[in-house]
Amino acid sequence: MIRSTFAGFTTAHLGMAASQRALDVTGQNIANINTPGYTRQRLDIASLNTQRGDFYNTSSNIKVGFGVEMTRISQLRDPFLDAQYRSQISKLGTTDAHAAGYEQLATIFDESTMLGVRNAFISLSSSLSTLSTESGNTENDTAVRSNMQVLLNLFHDAANRLNDIRQDTQQGFAATDIKDVNELLENIAELNKSIKTSHVLGNPALELQDQRNSLLDELGSYLPITVKYKDQPVGPGQTVEVLNVSFTDTNGKKYTLISDGYAGFLSTDVSGQPVSLSLTDANGTTSQVAGMTTNPVTGEEEYVEILGSGTIKGTLDLLNKSGDFDQTDFKGIGYYEKALDALVDKFATTFNEANKSVERNPDGTIKDKDNLIPRDLFTTSDGSNKFTAMNIKISDEWLNGTYGITITNNVVKDDIGEDETGSTGNEVIMNMIKLLDSTSHEFKGGDNNTKFYTGTFHDCFAALENTLGIDANSANTLLENQIAVLNQTSNSRDGVSGVQLDEEGMNLLHYNQSYNAAARLMTTLDEALDKLINGTGVVGR
């Protein structure tokens, strides 16, 4: 079989066309070198040979291909690096939410640059010392009350600011985080439909795939997602690649977030505590992934959160977990609320107990030394029997002068002028001063009355600052390490998917040379054909 005369021209033409298209792709890459989310493209080619095999073959009938075939334009992506990047950014999202929460809390307990609780306790101790030397002076009692009020104002301010942080975080969680996740899920599902339609029509839709990959990266910062691709039949002998996104909880249960063009969504309830979160998957099944649930073994209500990582988990940790007070692994806003309330309750009950007074007869002797009369310095504004940083207030009786700081609970002098008990006449006040300086106070908080500190009142407050500082420093250190790891993964991924100017420049030279070579082949074939047509059969003319 004689090969077609013009087959070589076809080979040269296909080579020139492939080189020209490769130059176009290279130019597209260079043009988008600064485009966010752009993935480097490549022309995929294959050798073209459409000849059938012959039953009989000879050395003169050697099969030669017909050139090159352009199969498609593809993106250069490494699925493993994509999965690794999304796993790292999910962990980073958790730590980032923790660090951001600690940064807000630090403004409440950091007293390094302001006069706060420490100064208030010092002023209170000083005013009590002055009252002890002039115990009958009502102005000194008023000074003590004023310093007490300053201290309570600081407690109120801390409680209000904690509540503001909680409210702002809850509203931001519902109005921003959950809304953003649902929009991401919906947008990715819509892109799935558009990409699928484009593939059916023969358009690779690479730019749409770039948009989808960027949205998947963003979604991965909120939830630990898994991305799977599969071929879906759309006609006889024709398939298209579709994308499914799933989430696996800490118990190993899998939830389908996106299935082809269908998407699930998240919903939350921030009206009470703890904040709950539910997930409705792409199949329409709703499951609670955070909130109160009944333990199937003990039958008791307990908080459950089964998110592995992500910004959503970090925010829920901040809102719902209280560390040692609820036996969880994170000290969120609740820890500092409960610890501050425990400090205030211990302070109020201790000083109310210390200010109790004996009832005296008209001659000054004690009626019943074993039954002291309450003279509460503090009460609650909401009528409850538990003091908190929000509800503590100066008692109305102390405020209107019905009574003040109790001076002594000892009897008066006897008939011969001797003190029957060795009283100094101001032992109640001195006891209050000692109570301020006592390092044996035990502070307990939470529903389980968990002890979290032993020491003075001010040292307890300072311990909260130290605890917050340690946790914040740990979160920031972990955040820096995770950012470094994420950047390494991102650089590795960009090494595959990103446009490298030097490499594209080399490709320009390479494809230009291949184009010139194919053109030279066509010129050579033209010269040979010219010789065949015009240079043969002229003998004897």
Image: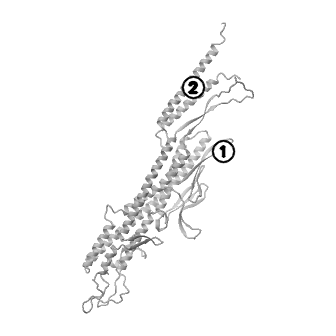
Name the mark on residue 306.
none
In the displayed orientation, state which residue is furthest to the right. 55
Instruction: Please state the total of marks drawn on the protein image.
Output: 2
The residue at the point 62 percent across, 47 percent down is: 230
Q: x%, y% of residue 287?
A: 58, 60
Q: x%, y% of residue 30?
A: 48, 36
Please give left or right for residue 269 compared with residue 153 in the image: right
Examine the image and state in which quarter residue 353 appears: bottom left
Please give left or right for residue 210 compared with residue 236 in the image: left
The answer to whether residue 501 is visible is yes
Residue at the disc numbered 2: 518
The residue at the point 25 percent across, 81 percent down is: 136
Q: Secondary structure at mark 2?
A: helix
Relative vertical location of residue 132 with respect to residue 180 in this rendering, above or below? below
Q: Mark 1 Cα within 10 Å, few/some/many (few <14, many 20+)?
A: few
Q: Amino acid at mark 1?
A: Pro
| Whole-number angstrom distance, CA of label 1 to CA of label 2 | 39 Å
Name the mark on residue 233.
1
Q: x%, y% of residue 222?
A: 50, 54
The answer to whether residue 404 is visible is no
Q: Which mark sits nearer the N-terminus, 1 or 2?
A: 1
Tell me how the rendering is colored: one colour
Q: Secondary structure at mark 1?
A: strand
Examine the image and state in which quarter residue 417 appears: bottom left
Q: Nearer the viewer, residue 150 or 541?
A: 541
Relative vertical location of residue 445 with respect to residue 179 in this rendering, above or below? below
Q: Nearer the viewer, residue 287 or 449?
A: 449
Please give left or right for residue 411 compared with residue 232 in the image: left
- Quadrant where the C terminus is found in the figure: top right
